[in-house]
Image: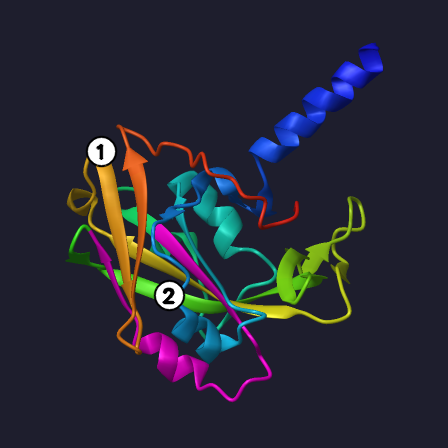
Amino acid sequence: MQKLIIIILFSFNACVLTLISPGLNSNYRLDNITNIKFEEAAFYGSKHYNLSAFFIEYENLNLIINDINNTTFNKDEKMAIKDFDQNKIHLMVELCYDKEKEINIFEDFEKHYFQLNNHSYESKISYFYPYSFYKRGSRISKKYPFYMNDDYPYNKFILKTGTDFLMCIRTILVFEKENQINGKNEFEILTPRNTHIFFSYEYNHQFVFYKGERMDFSAK
């Protein structure tokens, strides 16, 4: 009976929190308050399309920007923790799409517009981020970050978590601290197809963890 109780408790905790990638977990997900936009799904590939947004704590930024899966649009461009200010607000948008579709993804993403409480961002950086995946019905779902280091002491070796990958784009947006309020905050994305997508989150002197976990991701 004792073993059964332990298993049940573990399973309950696993449903509460999903680790997504180094420095990022589902507690920091923003609440998507917009219905699925079919025109966006059709453009990016309906089986692959997924759009998420996250709040980033400054202390997690180092793990996020040094993830071995990151590839900036400009390969000569490097991300460094010195490029970020702990007195700013950092949000992340992650968009997954069908990499086989003929999309000028660079041009498309440059035409996205982002606002926090009707304030534009101060700066942003976008980069590719691949996931291994599994099929859930007709949909493609993220599984693990595609690359990972082997366990210590062999962590200089890089392993693949799948034979193929789902490509996503991550964008880290920097906002002025004054753009955020205590209470409910609204984050808006305007796409090149004039589609408005809204997210929200609560802030009460600190980020209020997301409570609508839907287990879209597997652990890592």
Residue 44, percent across and down? Answer: 48, 76
At x 15% / y 55%, what residue is drawn?
118
Residue 171 in sight in this render = yes
Residue 102 is one of the magenta-drawn residues: yes
Label 2 sits on a secondary structure element that is strand
Which is in the foreground here, disc 2 or disc 1?
A: 1
Amino acid type of disc 1? Gly
Q: Residue under circle 1?
A: 183
Q: Secondary structure at mark 1?
A: strand
Q: Amino acid at mark 2?
A: Ile
Residue 10 as seen in the image, left or right of residue 84: right
Q: Which mark is residue 217?
A: none
The residue labelled by disc 2 is 125
Residue 75 x, y percent position in the rendering: 50, 77
- Numbered range of the magenta stretch: 91-116
Q: Quadrant of the N terminus?
A: top right
Q: Nearer the viewer, residue 67 or 193?
A: 193
